[in-house]
Image (cartoon, rainbow, N blue to C red):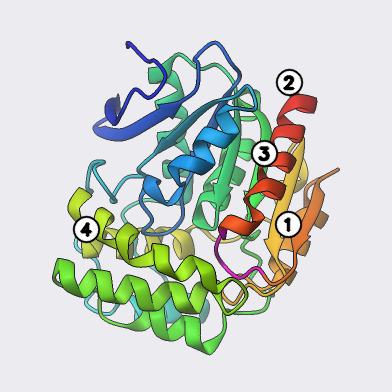
Amino acid sequence: MDLELGSGERFAPVGDLKLCFETFGRPSEPPLILIAGLGAQMILWDEAFCEALAARSLWVVRFDNRDVGRSSRIDWTPPADAGAAVAGRQKGERLAAPYRLKDMAADAIGLMDALGVARAHVVGASMGGMIAQEMAIGWPERVRSLTSIMSTTGDPRLPPPSPQVMQVFTKPPPKTAEDYVEANVAAWLVFRGPGYPDDEARDRPRAERAARRGLDPEGGQRQLLAVYASGSRKPALPSVTAPTLVIHGADDPLMPLAAGEDTAATIPGAKLVVLPRMGHALPMAVWPRVIDEIAELAKRAT
């Protein structure tokens, strides 16, 4: 592939799928893979954020996970009430899901193969952090360093999301682009919390851009089922050997701070960075600290 600075969106074959990806920086630099969260397109990793990481001598790759954005969709119809199915799983009932987080981790490994990347620094946010953890567990030889942002081990004993967040997840998925934009804007008000109101102006333009890139309401439901069907990573995480950074917001309503603390305590030698007033989002005001921490870890691990 002809991959150069500002290469634009491209597609890579990964098994039976095609993953949409974009790169920033020079391929001669150490590669860094950014993995987005549940229902989130790769554009949630803002271009300016990616460019700032690339400026720290890293080749940055962002991509759409399966079932979101411009990447391939899975042909599997979720139950009419995915929220009820998840609630049943939490009570010990069997949960049907078309794939697991380990399969999504294999997608990222397949993308690395397509790009000719033997080892990479891996950064994941929320569900992306879970996928990054699966990569470090299942493919330790491919992960130079692991950064888990506002994520969790999946231990069921951890505190649950706030009631306001659960209301967001239990609402019926939007049917139109207009409904998606409105729902997305409302959701980010809940996820981000009141700590960084200046970022609110960016929510609607980003949601409109995501709607233009491609929507599949059932795709997010399939990803949600994958998260809960995968269970806890806590028993396996002590085997992780990659240098690890855990970043978490002090006021995260979706993954309470205890989830980040548990992740850092479970992975040997992991460093925990707690950002005051941060909810379940990466506001622009915290980018310099987050980028510094990721780049420093990458430098040490390289």
Q: Earlier in the sequence, mark 2 or mark 1?
A: 1
What residue would you read off at disc 2? 302
The answer to whether the residues at label 3 and label 2 have Cβ atoms under 8 Å apart is no
> Badge 2, how many Cα within 10 Å: few under 14, some, many 20+?
few
Q: Nearer the viewer, mark 4 or mark 2?
A: 4
Helix, strand, or loop for circle 1? helix
User: In this view of the protein, can residue 189 be seen by the observer?
Assistant: yes
Q: Real-space Cα distance between discs 1 and 4?
A: 33 Å
The answer to whether the residues at label 1 and label 4 have Cβ atoms under 8 Å apart is no
Q: Which mark is drawn over residue 263?
A: 1
Q: In front here: 133 or 293?
A: 293
Task: Give me the residue at 77% from left, 46% from top.
Answer: 238
Q: Is residue 192 above or below residue 50?
A: below
> Badge 1, how many Cα within 10 Å: few under 14, some, many 20+?
many
Image coordinates of residue 40 in percent, x first then y, are: 38, 56
Helix, strand, or loop for circle 2? loop
What residue would you read off at disc 3? 146
Q: Which mark is drawn over residue 211?
A: 4
The answer to whether the residues at label 4 and label 2 have Cβ atoms under 8 Å apart is no
Task: Give me the residue at 58% from left, 16% from top.
Answer: 29
Q: Earlier in the sequence, mark 3 or mark 2?
A: 3
Image coordinates of residue 66 in percent, x first then y, are: 32, 45
Q: Real-space Cα distance between discs 4 and 3?
A: 30 Å
Q: Earlier in the sequence, mark 1 or mark 3?
A: 3
Classify the position of the N terminus by image quarter: top left
The answer to whether the residues at label 4 and label 3 have Cβ atoms under 8 Å apart is no
Amino acid on which the number 4 mark rests in the picture: Ala
Magenta span covers which residues? 278-283
Q: Residue furthest left?
A: 176
Q: Real-space Cα distance between discs 3 and 2?
A: 12 Å
Q: Earlier in the sequence, mark 4 or mark 2?
A: 4
Amino acid on which the number 2 mark rests in the picture: Thr
